[in-house]
Amino acid sequence: MVRTVLLEKIKTILETIDVIKIIEEGFISYSKGNVVIPPVGEMIFEEAPGECHIKYGFIKEDEYFVIKVATGFYNNPKINLPASDGLMLLFSQKTGQLLCVLLDEGHLTNVRTAAAGAIASKYMAPRKVHRIGVFGAGIHGRLQPIYLQKVLDCKNIVTWGMNEQELEIYKRDMERLGFEVETTMNPEDITSTCNLIVTCTPSKTPLISADLIQEGTHITAIGSDTPEKQELDSAILQRADRVIVDSIDQCMLRGESFKAMLAGMMTKDKMVELGNIIGDENLRRQSDEEITVVDLTGVAVQDIQIAKAVWNSIKE
């Protein structure tokens, strides 16, 4: 019998799961070649505007495979609807039977993305992060600083947003969680004061130029998950000492690395996969003067890992 699990139950289960650990394990397995991930399926709706992503795959010699559908429709808040939605389907690898429908409303995607951002900083951020800069005041702009607390000690954040009303709500919400918050609509307020920057917007034009980046800065770029999106000036990746990606294959087709290669400012051989740096200290940041970029486009192994963890908790 197929189990259907609603968001409230999923949130309760997540409290018992070490999400960072399971996502790390997924990246390692992926970079070892033990995961089968077909190309991303997506639909882009220009008029809405909105998008639908279908990500799916399986880990070899595992019990399950997962299909995830996630949507983002950015004008929804204007009509009192959430900007994101979605579900995950978990099947048996042995029989092909559907075992579980996780009606997470996009929450599992948000959480696994936040965990990936934390992993990026765990291995690539400077030893001492004195201030976190966040581009984007939406759900990812909130979850990224929250999950970063699991890997570093810094609650001083400055956040860029599109309008003052959005930023006022953000500041109120994050201060209630114990963060020291400054808001801005000027990117230089972030680049001049932060040595850890996270970008998590759906922008199609760069938000930061290369000349604004200070030595020793780490950037985790999350928003550019389609071929059209771009948050970073490609010259930043050209200038960076290290460029880490969640998937080389996927970042050849989307993300900041794709844009930099398209502009002739970077080649494939500069990219190193996140799953490889977890196990090799020599591939990580080697000094606090380096400029580093982690380009996260969202890989289906993250969905596989988090869906499996929820299902296994349900079975137990």
Image (tube, rainbow, N blue to C red):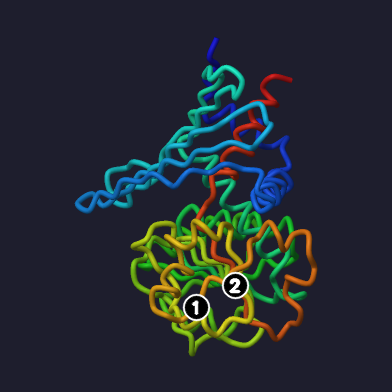
Residue at 54% x, 82% y is 191
Decide which of 67, 167 is in the foreground and name it. Answer: 67
Query: Residue farthest to the left?
Result: 47
Q: Residue at x 65, y 75 (%)?
A: 131
For the N terminus, give its image quadrant.
Answer: top right
SS under mark 2: strand
Q: Depth-wise, is mark 1 or mark 2 nearer the camera?
A: 1
Q: Tag on residue 216?
A: none
Which mark, by number, is residue 243?
2
Residue 105 image point, x, y percent: 45, 35
Residue 23 relative to residue 170: left or right: right
User: Measured along the vertical axis of the image, is residue 132 above or below residue 106?
Assistant: below
Give the residue at x 48% y 36%.
Answer: 68
Q: Is residue 86 above or below residue 282?
A: above
Q: Quadrant of residue 181?
A: bottom right
Give the SS element for disc 1.
loop
The dot on residue 266 is 1
Mark 1 burial class by Cα count in 10 Å: few <14, some 14-19, many 20+ = many
The amino acid marked with disc number 2 is Val
**In which image quadrant can residue 15 be found?**
top right
Task: Using residue 294 as the reference point, say whether residue 51 is left or right of it.
Answer: left
**Among the two numbered marks 1 and 2 on one chain, the one whose residue lies closer to the N terminus:** 2
Residue 138, horizontal then vertical, whole percent: 45, 56
Q: Position of residue 304 (x, y in %)?
A: 59, 37
* Mark 1 vs 2: CB contact within 8 A: yes
* Label 1 to label 2: alpha-carbon separation: 10 Å
